[in-house]
Amino acid sequence: MIKSFFNFVLIWLVFFSSLGYTLNQLQQPEFLTEQLREAKTYERLSSHTETFLPKENIENLPFNNQDLEDIIKSTIDANTFYDFTDKWLTAYINWFKSDDQFVGFSYNLTQIKEKLVTTATDKALVRYDSLDVCTNKQLTAWDATKGLPECKISSSASDSNTVKPLFKAQIENQIKELPDTFKTGDTPSPLELKIKESVKAANKAILIIWVATFLFIALYFVFFRAHAFMSLSIIFIIAGLLEIGFGLIGWEWLRNSLVDGFKTQQELFAALLVDISASIIEVMKTILGNLSIITLSLGAVSLILGIYFAIKSRSKTLG
């Protein structure tokens, strides 16, 4: 009776050990960054610049939405975006797992701002060159300090010292409020603190489960020796089947729950979050699936060894 109870406990310990290892991948920054790449996060965000930029700022710039998309893609390319994301995730994940009070993440934006001014100015000059030459009436109201003028001055080439500084000044005026360094806040938000507590509690629980699993298996060999293999074969096979069952049902339930939770988000972000979570869950499903194969294989090996030692023990008894 007691042995059956311990068998039952060890089955769930093995299952939760595998599940804990799988969920632990969420604490790997490179894994999360790769999932963002798989979901084409950069491409989707950069093609919806109007969603992130204040309308009043866009209206004061000599660009349409396509121009803004081209400028942002040129200024912040995919490598820069994912480099920032990886470093940001690394800083936060390390903080979630630590006892530190502050995150302490910073990212230098000076070169990005300089490239933004250069790229935007060049784009504005291209737009300016495509304008019709001003009539005498239009010349009296010509102004290039507040957006793109209605026409171009015939004697003023786009690369002249007259027009280019005007456009450059417009761009610099619009981004002057942007900081030279992106920094996390001095005080973590309530949500960040809640996540930190949850991560630390989850890691502690996973560690306890892993230690308990190895101790239980070690005790089986201490008390039952060769006879432990038959019990362990049943334990590993049932645990492996539980892992397969969770892979078929559990991940799908989790995905549907996340989709329902994302419905309250803005449409672009909702679609993006759904795709990212779907990509992550598919990888997690694969990881747990591979672990289930390992668990079932351990069960098969334990069964073979159990049969071998049972036959050997009987032979000694008969001999």
Image (spheres, rainbow, N blue to C red):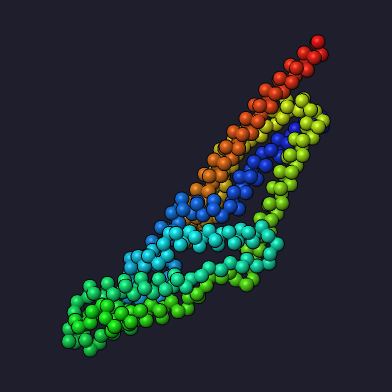
Image quadrant for the N terminus? top right
Image quadrant for the C terminus? top right
Relative to 95, 56 lies left or right: left
Question: Residue 191: x percent and y percent?
Answer: 62, 63
Q: Is residue 215 visible?
A: yes
Q: Is residue 103 above or below residue 222?
A: below
* Pick the front one: 286 or 82: 82
Q: Is residue 178 above or below residue 260?
A: below
Question: Residue 26: x percent and y percent?
Answer: 59, 51
- Residue occupying the far left of the picture: 136
Q: Is residue 215 above or below residue 120?
A: above
Relative to 36, 154 lies left or right: left
* Pick the front one: 239 or 203: 203
Relative to 301, 48 lies left or right: left
For residue 315, which quarter of the picture?
top right
Residue visible at 61% across and 47% down? 23
Residue visible at 81% across and 13% down? 317
Residue visible at 27% across and 72% down? 126
For residue 46, which quarter of the picture?
bottom left
- Residue occupying the far bottom of the picture: 140
